[in-house]
Image (cartoon, rainbow, N blue to C red):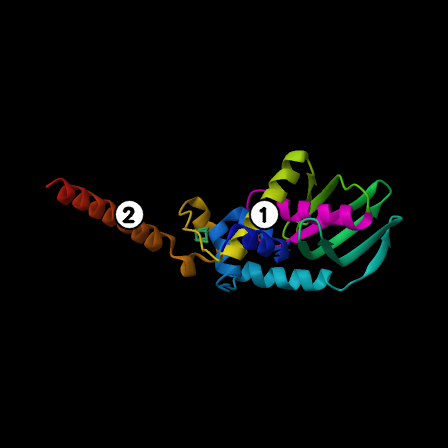
Amino acid sequence: MDGANADEDLDLVEVLISALEHFSYCPRQYGLIHLEQTFDQNIYTIRGQLAHERVDAGEVELTEGIRVERAIPLWSDRLGLRGKADVVEFRPDGPYPIEYKVGPPRGKHADVQLCAQALCLEEMLGVSVARGAIFHVATRRRREVEFSELLRDRTTGLVEATRQMLVTQVLPPPVNDARCGHCSLVESCLPDVVSDRLRLEQVDGQAFELAAEASATQ
Ligand code: SF4
């Protein structure tokens, strides 16, 4: 693929907002799901689907004078993003997106997904979106997220990295660290086995280079 064609391809490829959390957690996890269509159902993914079906009802309601809309389609032509917001509260100081999460909190990886929703709302509505929240279904608690410049930069960087992987279709190597213990794809990914194989290939390659150098000097 030459440089010009690569740029054209990058322009065409849309990134799903919901995929950014996977990429942030582990690029290989994203690749397994979106390049290789691997998806392991577990109790959290099933509960997640049920929770999202409930908020996918497309309802509009008024809560304490604030309009609350559910399952709003989102997009950004500027960033090549599309997806959906679980809930948006239309507060007097601007829209406030809320993302529902069912599984145990996994650091702040969902923050990029929420921030991408905010970037879409800003572009679609021509307003600024300063904050939103992650709603943890198990504890019924909200964690507020501020859309700082740092988080915005991280989010746009991840959108580009995600698009790059979609274009190149290259599955990255396993991270093979503490994240794997909490990953629902560990049985499909086999991080230990793949890491060992990559190490062996590297050792083999080095041995081959040493042998080639030795025979060249004889
Ligand atoms: S098992 Fe580890 S390397 Fe594999 S997808 Fe999950 S977190 Fe990433």
Residue 68 in percent (x, y) is at 82, 53
Tell which residue pokes out farthest to the right in this image.
65
Secondary element at tag 1: helix
Q: Amino acid at mark 1?
A: Glu
In this figure, what is the number of numbered marks? 2
Q: Where 130 sits versus 199, above or below?
A: above
Question: Label 2: few (<14), some or many (≥20) within 10 Å?
Answer: few
Is the residue at mark 1 in contact range of ligand 1, meaning its CB lies under 8 Å from it?
no
- x and y percentages locating residue 98 in the rendered image: 72, 49
Above/below status of 128 relative to 165: above
Disc 2 and disc 1 in contact, CB within 8 angstroms: no
19 vs 93: above or below = below
Per the image, is 100 magenta?
A: yes
From the viewer's perspective, is 193 left or right of 109? Answer: left
What residue span does the magenta drawing correspond to? 96-125
Q: Residue at x 74, y 40 (%)?
A: 131
Considering depth in this image, is 177 or 45 the residue closer to the camera?
177
Which residue lies under the disc numbered 1? 160
Between the residue at mark 2 and the residue at mark 1, the CA separation in whole angstroms equals 29 Å
Image quarter hosting the C terminus: top left
For the point 81% across and 61% down, which residue is it? 59
Between 124 and 212, the residue placed more toward the observer is 212
Does residue 27 appear in the picture of this structure?
yes
Examine the rendering and report whether any part of residue 22 can be seen: no
Q: Give the residue type that dot 2 points to.
A: Gln
What kind of element bears circle 2?
Answer: helix
Q: Residue 58 versus residue 205: which sits nearer the camera?
A: 205
Q: On the image, numbered disc 2 is attached to which residue?
A: 202
